[in-house]
Amino acid sequence: MQRITFYDLPETLEAFKAIAEGKQNTPFGTAALTVLAFCVYPKNKELSLQMLDILRGPRPLSVMDRQFIADRFRDKDYVPRSYFDGATPQNNYQPTDPYTITVSENPYSYQNEGYATLYVTSGGADSPRSVQLRLAKDGKWYLWEQYLLADIRKPESENPWA
């Protein structure tokens, strides 16, 4: 298990690239960067998609990927924030500062050479969500598949039953 901490959320592509430069050398860093990129989506969709393209390396998002992401964000902008420590349904997924993401592995995380399947903890889900990463020739880990946008518990402010 690794806890990856960010002191600021990037507001520009240049700021994101600078953060990514020091984090993509491990699959844990790339998994955490994926959460960071999704957190930008509610405020700036295009910037978020550009960040995801950086994380995907030589395999940019397809039109279908972009549509899937847009569909998952309908009325659920809180999902990516749920991956920060301290963000729970009770506090409407407001993370603690600094922004920390917990990423873990299991005995099956490295079954296929050059790939890693890691798990990101969400304050709104009963089990961690998986992210698959791929190691490229440049020594960086790139986003291959992600299941971070799956549904989670609604914030209490939006849940009439809470």
Image: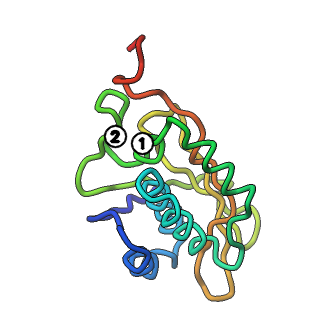
Q: In the depicted view, which residue is nearer to us: 80 or 24? A: 80
Q: Quadrant of residue 18?
A: bottom left
Q: Does 102 sit above or below residue 71?
A: below
Q: Does 56 sit above or below residue 98?
A: below
SS category of the residue bearing label 1: helix
Q: In the depicted view, which residue is nearer to us: 149 or 64? A: 64
Residue furthest toward the bottom? 138
SS category of the residue bearing label 2: loop
As drawn, is 85 to the left or to the right of 74? left
Q: Tell me the kind of residue under disc 2.
A: Ala
Q: In the depicted view, which residue is nearer to us: 35 or 53? A: 53
Q: Does 81 sit above or below residue 140?
A: above
Counting from the top left corner in percent of width and height, residue 31 is at 53, 61
Counting from the top left corner in percent of width and height, residue 147 is at 63, 48
Label 1, label 2: how many angstroms apart (C-alpha)?
A: 5 Å
Q: Quadrant of residue 131?
A: bottom right
As drawn, is 156 to the left or to the right of 120? left
Residue furthest toward the left? 97
Residue shown at the point (52%, 73%) measured from the top left: 26
Q: Tell me the kind of residue under disc 1.
A: Ser
Disc 1, disc 2: CB below 8 Å?
Answer: yes
Residue shown at the point (60%, 85%) measured from the top left: 139
Numbered tag placed on residue 22 in the rendering = none
As drawn, is 58 to the left or to the right of 103? right
Q: Which residue is mark 2?
A: 87
The tag earlier along the polypeptide, 1 or 2, is: 1
As drawn, is 53 to the left or to the right of 4? right
Counting from the top left corner in percent of width and height, residue 162 is at 38, 14
Numbered tag placed on residue 82 in the rendering = 1
Q: Residues within 10 Å of mark 1 (few under 14, many from 20)?
A: many
Q: Does 37 sit above or below residue 162?
A: below
Q: Residues within 10 Å of mark 2 (few under 14, many from 20)?
A: many
